[in-house]
Image (spheres, grey):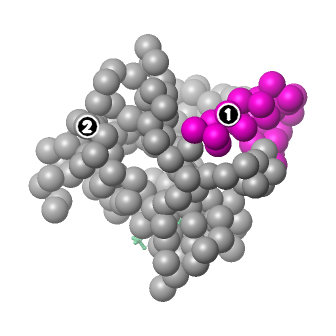
Amino acid sequence: MSEVRLVPLREADVRVMARVREDEAAAMGYPDAFGPTELAELRDRIARSGEFDGTEILLGIQVDGRLAGEVQARQPRMGLPPGVFELGIDLFDEADRGHGMGVIALSLLLKRLFEDEGAHRVQLTTDVDNAAMRRTSDRLGFVFEGVMRSFMPSVDGPRDYAIYAITRDDWEARR
Ligand SMILES: CC(C)(COP(=O)(O)OP(=O)(O)OC[C@H]1O[C@@H](n2cnc3c(N)ncnc32)[C@H](O)[C@@H]1OP(=O)(O)O)[C@@H](O)C(=O)NCCC(=O)NCCS
């Protein structure tokens, strides 16, 4: 099994992460949504990667020494209460998906959030048809809480998103 680690991102990672965001913006039907302003913001976020910067913890997923993806634990100011984080994850390459790395990366992030960052609830949202993320959420002990209708823009119109959460009590009960 490959060694999966969460590591701070570096300036050299900007290019691959920008490409991922350009593709996402196109898939949502907003191809201009990732431009020079967003690129500058991404560089700033990468410069702060590794620690909670008051808004998020952004980390790279390193697999056997190479950058295979990213995770975020977001806590936007005025968007979520203290102690509540929202997760995001992306394994960039299709070939890296479905080999257990998503579960490992998110377990490492959950451990950090509950043990070191004062989390009492960690949540995530995903497209109702994202079977991989929904199964990954189940595997990690997240509880399905419902569907946010018409949530995420896409080229075919807004998509419904499932919301999942794991509380500190849930997490401690699993250990
Ligand atoms: C979603 C994602 C993080 C999951 O990570 P992963 O490494 O591919 O998943 P894992 O290999 O750890 O598998 C976790 C579980 O999901 C299942 N699974 C994986 N891919 C699946 C798929 N395409 N369809 C159905 N189930 C799938 C696995 O079988 C496993 O369940 P099991 O233990 O019961 O067999 C990864 O696929 C990814 O980055 N996808 C693209 C970006 C994305 O969708 N991010 C989430 C946005 S909210």
Task: Look at the magenta stretch and give its main secondary structure.
Answer: helix
Q: Quadrant of residue 150?
A: top right
Which label is found at residue 118? Answer: 2
Residue under label 1: 44
84 horizontally vs 86: left or right:
left
Q: CA distance from mark 2 to mark 1?
A: 24 Å
Image height of 25 relative to 15, above or below: above
Element type where label 1 sits in the image: helix
Q: Quadrant of the C terminus?
A: bottom left
Check if mark 2's residue and mark 1's residue have beta carbons within 8 Å: no
Label 1 packing within 10 angstroms: few (<14), some (14-19), many (20+)? few
The residue lying furthest to the bottom in this view is 1
Note whether ligand 1 is within 8 Å of mark 1: no
Magenta residues, as a range? 19-48
* Type of the residue with mark 1: Asp
146 horizontally vs 152: left or right:
left
The residue drawn where x is 46% and y is 18% is: 77
Tell me which label, 2 or 1, sits earlier in the chain: 1
* Type of the residue with mark 2: Gly
Q: Position of residue 100 (x, y in %)?
A: 48, 73
Q: Position of residue 124 (x, y in %)?
A: 43, 41
Which label is found at residue 54? Answer: none
Q: Quadrant of residue 64?
A: bottom right
167 horizontally vs 101: left or right:
left
The residue drawn where x is 64% and y is 65% is: 68
Q: Position of residue 136 (x, y in %)?
A: 43, 60
**Nearer the observer, 118 or 173:** 118
The residue drawn where x is 53% and y is 58% is: 7
Element type where label 2 sits in the image: loop
